[in-house]
Image (cartoon, rainbow, N blue to C red):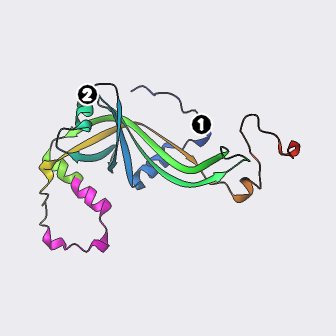
Amino acid sequence: MSQGPAMRRTDKAMSDERARELLARGYAGRLATVGPDGWPYAVPLLYVPMGDEIWVHNTAAPGHLRVNVGHEPRVCFEIDEPGEVFAYGRFECDSSVAYRSVIAFGRIRVVDDRAEKQRFCEALLARYHRPEWERPEASRPEGFFPRLDMITVYAIAIERITGKETPLPLPAERWPAKDMTRSPNAIPPENSR
């Protein structure tokens, strides 16, 4: 795979290890594909990291996602953790947001093997299960996945992963304690009245 464009803000780059840690603990992500008409399409999905792959699922009905995957296996998957919006300068446009994000680039495949689909479903349920739901385990026999044939499971083989972050600056590093105005043609504070 080509390495793609270089990351412009290398000062915000995460290590590969840190990016994979964020991917492992993220909640949901967005899968981006390209269709036969050249239009991009992104869909939010729950996911399970499994080895060097990201596994997701969607309906088995042929739709936008399945058509795009059939057209072009190159995809990217993005997750993020947004933080607080903060001011760093005197004008509204001199604001930013604390965040962490990861983009995994790779090739997607449809998982047809029933045992692999079931393994994904077991991992998905383990990842997103909430004890407060109090669903009786006895009501679900082991290996009981009645919707297995109603879903399509996809696995994205990660070929490249990038992560970026902007931590929330300490109060002493934000406006008004520190003026980091970047707006073009801004009047310096000592010249304003």
Q: Residue furthest front?
A: 193
| Residue 79 x/y as whole percent | 43, 47
**Residue 14 falls within the magenta-colored stretch:** no
Question: For this rendering, which residue is in front, 188 or 74?
Answer: 188
Q: In which quarter of the image is residue 140?
A: bottom left
Q: What element carries label 1?
A: loop
For residue 112, the mark is: none
Q: Name the residue under label 2.
A: 71
Q: Tell me the residue at 42%/25% (across/down).
A: 2
* Residue type pointed to by label 1: Arg
- Do the residues under discs 2 and 1 have CB atoms within 8 angstroms? no
Q: Is mark 2 on a helix, strand or loop?
A: helix
Disc 2/disc 1 C-alpha distance (Å)? 32 Å
Whether 132 is drawn above or below 106: the answer is below
Question: For this rendering, which residue is in front, 85 or 154?
Answer: 85
Side of 49 where 95 appears, left or right: right
Whether 73 is drawn above or below 120: the answer is above
Which residues make up the magenta segment? 121-140
| Residue 174 x/y as whole percent | 71, 53
* Residue type pointed to by label 2: His
For residue 9, the mark is: 1
Comes first in the chain, label 2 or label 1: 1
Bin the neighbour count of mark 1 within 10 Å (Cα to Cα): few under 14, some 14-19, many 20 and up: few
Side of 51 where 175 appears, left or right: right
Q: Tell me the residue at 27%/32% (across/down).
A: 68
